[in-house]
Amino acid sequence: MARYDGPKCRLCRREGMKLFLKGDRCFTDKCAYERRPYPPGQHGRGRHKMSDYAVQLREKQKVRRMYGVLEQQFRLYFAEADRAKGVTGTNLLAQLETRLDNVVFRMGFANSRNQARQLVRHGIFTLNGRKVDIPSMQVKVNDVVEIPEKNRKIPVIQEAQSVLARRGSPSWLEVDGAAFRGRITAIPNREDIQFPIQEQLIVELYSK
């Protein structure tokens, strides 16, 4: 399946905010967005007036890139969120947050969502005691994500534990770092998702 494999920092600069795609580097002065906080390209520093459609599109692209989801996948998430009860935008964000790769990242077992996706694909984690290798799997309340004993000494996992202290874990997750285990205590609501996302713009874009 096609997936963007170019410079990650370029995406942050294009969307005008840190998407935390490179883990620990995003917290240092080496962060490309901190050094060049304007869009890439020779016209990046110019002033551009954006139409309503462009604003909506950029918001959708920002969220899609943040969670590492392809366009077709994103459309499917939106369709399901639209069918579900409640606010469509909140439903969409809750689905993205409860992807297994995102949960692994939010628990502090990976430096970035991209790294979490790779670790899941390699079967590093178990879900309720069973080995899993599908990053897009949706977790549920009371599901337990754990790293088996044999995988706990992987360097990138130990490095990620130190980053968690700075990043913190959300209230809907219960994490026991010493035991390399985490539990989903609730489905995240809008207040639990602190990223500067205007999900209503995405709803407006897909509702045209």
Image (cartoon, rainbow, N blue to C red):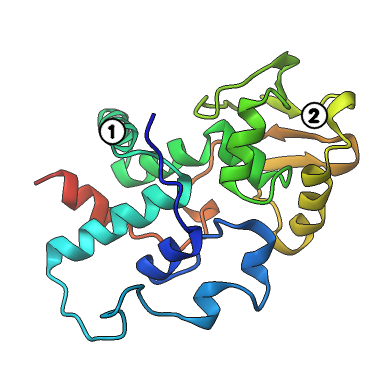
Q: Is residue 92 visible?
A: yes
Examine the image and state in which quarter residue 134 appears: top right
Residue pictured at 69% horizontal, 61% vertical: 24
Q: Earlier in the sequence, mark 1 or mark 2?
A: 1
- Is 166 positioned to the left or the right of 42 in the image? right
Outermost bottom residue: 46
Residue 186 visible at all: no
Taking the image as shown, residue 97 lies to the left or right of residue 74, namely right
Q: Local crowd at mark 1 within 10 Å, few (<14), some, or many (≥20)?
A: few
Image point 13% across, 66% down: which residue?
52
Question: In terms of depth relative to the viewer, which is nearer, 66 or 97?
Answer: 66
Q: Is residue 80 above or below residue 206?
A: above
Whole-number angstrom distance, CA of label 1 to CA of label 2: 31 Å
The amino acid type found where label 2 is placed reads Ile
Residue occupying the far top of the picture: 130
Task: List x then y, in percent, for residue 33.
Answer: 50, 74
Specify few, some or many for label 2: CA neighbours under 10 Å numbering under 14, 14-19, or 20 or more: many
Judging by the rendered image, the residue that carries numbered circle 1 is: 72
Which residue is labeled 2 in the image?
A: 147
Q: Which residue is at a point 45% across and 39% down the rendered structure image?
A: 96
Q: Residue 94 appears in which quarter of the rendering?
A: top left
User: Is residue 141 toward the left or the right of residue 76 in the image?
Assistant: right
> At which x and y percent is residue 3?
40, 39
Classify 114 as above or below 134. below
- Residue 21 sits above or below residue 52 on the image: above
